[in-house]
Image (spheres, grey):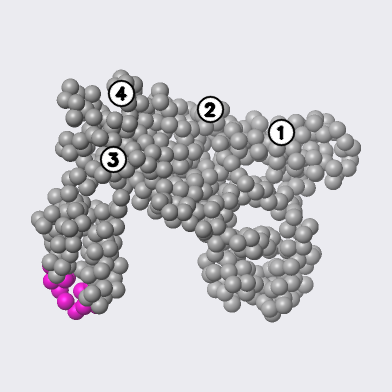
Amino acid sequence: MSDPKDILRSILQEEIRKLGASSEVHLERPRNPEHGDWSTNVALQLAKELKRKPRDIAEHLKTATTDALVESGITTPAGVSIAGPGFYNVKLNPLIKLRPILEALERGKDYGQALASSDEKVQVEFVSANPTGPLHVGHGRQAALGDAIAALLESQGHNVTREFYYNDGGAQIDKLTRSVQARARGLRPGDTGWPEEGYAGEYIEDIAREFKGNIEDADAVRRFAVQYLRAEQDTDLRAFGVKFDVYYLESSLYTEGKVDAVVKAWGARGKTYEKEGALWLRTTEYGDDKDRVVRKSDGSYTYFVPDVAYHLTKWQRGFERVVDVQGTDHHSTVTRVRVGLQALGAGIPDGWPDYVLHSLVKVMRGGQEVKVSKRAGSYVTVRDLIDWVGRDAVRFFLVSRKADSEFVFDVDLAREKSDENPVYYVQYAHARVCSVFAQWGGEAGALAAAKLERLSGEREAALARLIAEFPETVSTAAREAAPHDIAFYLRELAAQFHSYYNAERILVDDEELRMARLALCAAVRQTLANGLSLVGVSAPEKM
């Protein structure tokens, strides 16, 4: 069934075209519900272009479009009105506003997903982990955000690949190797001979104990430690409910010559020069505030060079859209990578790839900030959080705020069974609906014939409106890589349902009204379940 909003926008857009104008119609919910269900200020936008008063333009649009809107069945002649300086408002037919209830029941698990698939090839790189220890809470936020973004994109029909980028090179690996060797020799953090800035977590002792080779063979220790921690991080991700399709090792960029090839390509295009023994890239030609060092005087590459090489492989693998989820400490990486890619002249669009940068997470427990994990030594791990509050709470909490906003993970709140705990509040709404259906005991298939016109209350209208907004909410969240929009939506839908449940009896004696209310509740349940699934959280039937 066609979306009334799309029909309204299309009819208005056609009339604007006839006026010889080009403004896009943007529809919003009016602040005052008495003004209708949808409103647009397009007449105000057209005033300058058409050299007419906004109110006159709005009145013209009303006269020119009302018949078409009535014929489409989405409103009545009295349903179109003009307010203020030229706001065009439309009230939908009551039955039209209830149609999303049936749509949610008909489409089931597919409600909220795009009706048509897309051939767009998309990649989400959702954990860029240093392999020197267990996944910390910051990595957990990356994983929760990335997995939810991937699910949102899949819901819109995109061909999505989840990629785990494994940073297995650099000075931190040497530090890891020396730490394991020191533990194997019987040293502990703080002892004489302990490596400077060595890793102090218990996992280092575990690696040293499991290693059976020659502890003096640094290469063997390095390979074993990286493999051990890679398996540990796999375990953490599985416990977190995150799946991925591809493992990409940073070291392969060097062993396969991809980093050298990028530097050579820059040079061939005259984009590099030497100064003070170092090789520089002319990044200012692409809007950077200064040129950047590519290769230092000691022959080593700077950090952004392998990043450029890595993203070039993504372009060569045919990914039209790439979303990288990283911490805000990688903010400078965005400019460097994009500029480096432009300097290759490979036809990569300006502003590619997309980045979602997230702030770090502060963990509070018992009113105190938790900074140390016995297992990791200096930070709280994803596994710690899961052990304390469960996977569902961790995943919901970590996507419940805009990625770049500061976030405090309150362990005590996440364990509460109260309205203050957002994940409990949403899951409890789903369980409440399930309880209603358990009491009813009828066949859900019979709800398709429910007489929805019996739903005349304000709370019922509010629930129907929220159900109707779900597909567009999902579409927007996917386009903007914003899973927090789903968390906000679910809390609003749950709040509206709890209010309805507390104010009205569902299983009334009047059979027509009972079936209509059950159909509404079933649509709420399906929408809640679909939304929770998108952020990787379960929809329990009992709580």
Q: Secondary structure at mark 4?
A: loop
Distance from the alpha carbon under mark 3 to that under mark 2 = 38 Å
Mark with earlier residue (2, 4): 2
Instruction: Report the amino acid beneath label 3.
Output: Ile
Give amino acid for label 2: Trp
Left or right: residue 448 compared with residue 453: right
Point 19% across, 79% down: residue: 51
Ranked by sequence position, the earlier of labels 1 and 3 is 3
For label 4, the residue is 442
Q: Earlier in the sequence, mark 1 or mark 4?
A: 1
Question: Secondary structure beneath disc 1?
Answer: helix
Measured from the top left, where is residue 468 in percent x and y?
A: 30, 46
Residue 53 on the magenta segment: yes
- Where in the figure is residue 112, as x and y percent of width and height? 39, 46
- Element under label 3? helix
Which amino acid lies under the numbered mark 4 shown in the image of this protein?
Gly
Query: In the drawing, does residue 386 fall left or right of residue 10?
Result: right
Q: Which residue is mark 3?
A: 101
Three-letter code, disc 1? Tyr
Q: Which mark is residue 203?
A: 1
Residue 388 circle label: 2
Residue 420, picture quadrant: top left
Q: Is most of the magenta stretch helix, strand or loop? A: helix
On the question of residue 506 being in view, the answer is yes
First in sequence: mark 1 vs mark 2: 1
Within-10-Å neighbours for mark 4: few <14, some 14–19, many 20+: few
Of badges 1 and 3, nearer the viewer stands 3
